[in-house]
Image (cartoon, rainbow, N blue to C red):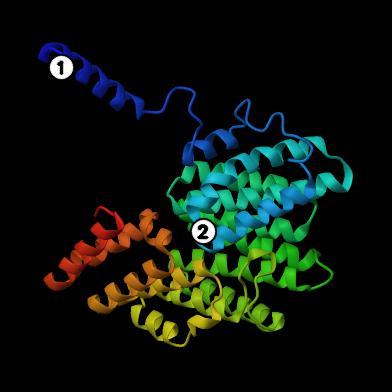
């Protein structure tokens, strides 16, 4: 083959290879784009699900799997599966009647709660707001006070992440008062949702430096934890006395009390924190407190441990990347070198 002819073939082949790696116009949507399409009710997504797909047993199991994966910090798995599940639940809510419809709405509320949580972790505030609002709409449609209280948690979280700390505090405390007033039986499910909602309000109060309200809500949550009698995961809340301690660490940190945050963290037995996501959150908060306290080497060691425990919590979250940058900005040269090697190793660019 002549050199000129070979060059034409090779060039055409290379060009085809490069363009072949790009998604075509008809490629399935992935990641956050898939969430956006599902939340928008994009035509064609879930419009013709089979009866087996819409069976209540299958939907219940799928929502439970999404919750478990979220709490295990398997965020990529949730991101792959949840958009299609949201569409299936939308269709189920439109298809079923009576008690089955109420159950479908409750599952939709929980699934949209997970969606909003994932989107908040990824810093997609606008989509998170849509998902949180859908969660509350479905919760109200379910007529289940406990589900309504649970969805109020994600509404509070969305308000808080958008900087509306006063509104977030008021939302959490108001919904907590409502479900406490309207609920006849203080079941473990109720106490868990009630206590978790109080904790979310306490965090919001801490972020606006309202020490009195934060302390009041923390004490009320602690009382609910004692009434519950231990650390559990009812209604996927991970609520109990230990979770109250975790929130005390976070709120002390928000108030600028790094020493108090570390002192509280010292009292927590990590073995009493069963969920990976909760453990990782504690470790990240502890690292931030150590950074504020000037203990850079210990802060770095805690972040490395957090990555071993929950890789996606460290590598995928913009908020954690900001924590890494804060540490990089203030650490001595020896720690900066280790931190640079670590972030390069896990694929995070500072």
* Quarter of the picture holding the C terminus: bottom left
Say the numbered circle drawn on residue 107.
none
Q: Which residue is mark 2?
A: 166
Q: Is residue 345 left or right of residue 190?
A: left
User: Closer to the camera, 88 or 93?
Assistant: 88
- In percent of the image, x 54 and y 51: which residue is there? 78
Q: Earlier in the sequence, mark 2 or mark 1?
A: 1
Relative to 66, say whether 254 is above or below. Answer: below
Q: Is residue 33 left or right of residue 40?
A: left
Q: Nearer the viewer, mark 2 or mark 1?
A: 1
Q: Residue furthest right?
A: 98
Asked which quadrant contains residue 235, the reply is: bottom right
User: Closer to the camera, 257 or 328?
Assistant: 328
User: Closer to the camera, 283 or 338?
Assistant: 338
Q: Is residue 225 left or right of residue 210?
A: right
Which element is circle 1 on? helix
Relative to 328, say whether 85 is above or below. Answer: above
Q: Which residue is mark 1?
A: 7
- In percent of the image, x 29 and y 54: which residue is there? 347
- In percent of the image, x 36 and y 78: which residue is there? 257
Q: Is residue 244 left or right of residue 262?
A: right
- Image coordinates of residue 195 in percent, x first then y, are 64, 71
Find the distance from the CA under tag 2 to the CA under tag 1: 67 Å
Asked which quadrant contains residue 37, the reply is: top right
The answer to whether residue 139 shows anywhere in this view is no
* Quarter of the picture holding the N terminus: top left
């Amino acid at each position: 083959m002549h050199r000129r002819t070979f060059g034409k073939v090779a060039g055409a082949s290379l060009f085809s290879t490069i363009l072949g790696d790009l998604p075509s116009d008809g490629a399935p949507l992935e990641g956050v784009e898939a969430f956006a399409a599902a939340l928008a009710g994009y035509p064609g997504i879930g419009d013709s699900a089979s009866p087996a797909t819409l069976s209540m047993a299958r939907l219940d199991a799928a929502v439970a799997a999404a919750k478990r994966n979220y709490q295990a910090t398997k965020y990529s798995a949730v991101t792959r599966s949840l958009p299609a599940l949201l569409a299936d639940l939308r269709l189920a809510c439109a298809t079923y009647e009576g008690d089955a419809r109420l159950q479908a709405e409750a599952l939709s509320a929980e699934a949209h709660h997970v969606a909003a949580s994932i989107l908040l972790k990824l810093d997609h505030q606008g989509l998170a707001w849509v998902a949180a609002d859908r969660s509350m709409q479905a919760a109200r449609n379910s007529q289940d006070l406990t589900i309504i209280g649970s969805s109020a948690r994600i509404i509070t979280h969305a308000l808080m992440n958008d900087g509306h700390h006063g509104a977030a505090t008021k939302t959490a405390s108001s919904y907590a008062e409502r479900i406490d007033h309207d609920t006849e039986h203080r079941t473990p499910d109720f106490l868990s949702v009630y206590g978790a909602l109080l904790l979310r309000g306490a965090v919001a109060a801490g972020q606006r430096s309202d020490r009195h309200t934060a302390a009041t809500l923390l004490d009320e949550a602690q009382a609910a934890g004692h009434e519950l009698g231990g650390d559990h995961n009812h209604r996927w809340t991970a609520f109990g006395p230990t979770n109250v301690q975790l929130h005390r660490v976070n709120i002390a940190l928000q108030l600028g009390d790094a020493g108090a945050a570390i002192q509280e963290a010292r009292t927590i037995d990590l073995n009493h924190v069963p969920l990976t996501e909760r453990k990782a959150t504690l470790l990240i908060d502890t690292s931030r407190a150590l950074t504020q306290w000037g203990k850079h080497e210990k802060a770095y060691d805690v972040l490395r441990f957090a990555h071993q425990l929950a890789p996606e919590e460290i590598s995928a979250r913009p908020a954690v990347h900001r924590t890494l940058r804060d540490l990089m900005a203030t650490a001595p040269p020896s720690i900066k070198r280790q931190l640079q090697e670590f972030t390069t190793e896990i694929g995070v660019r500072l």
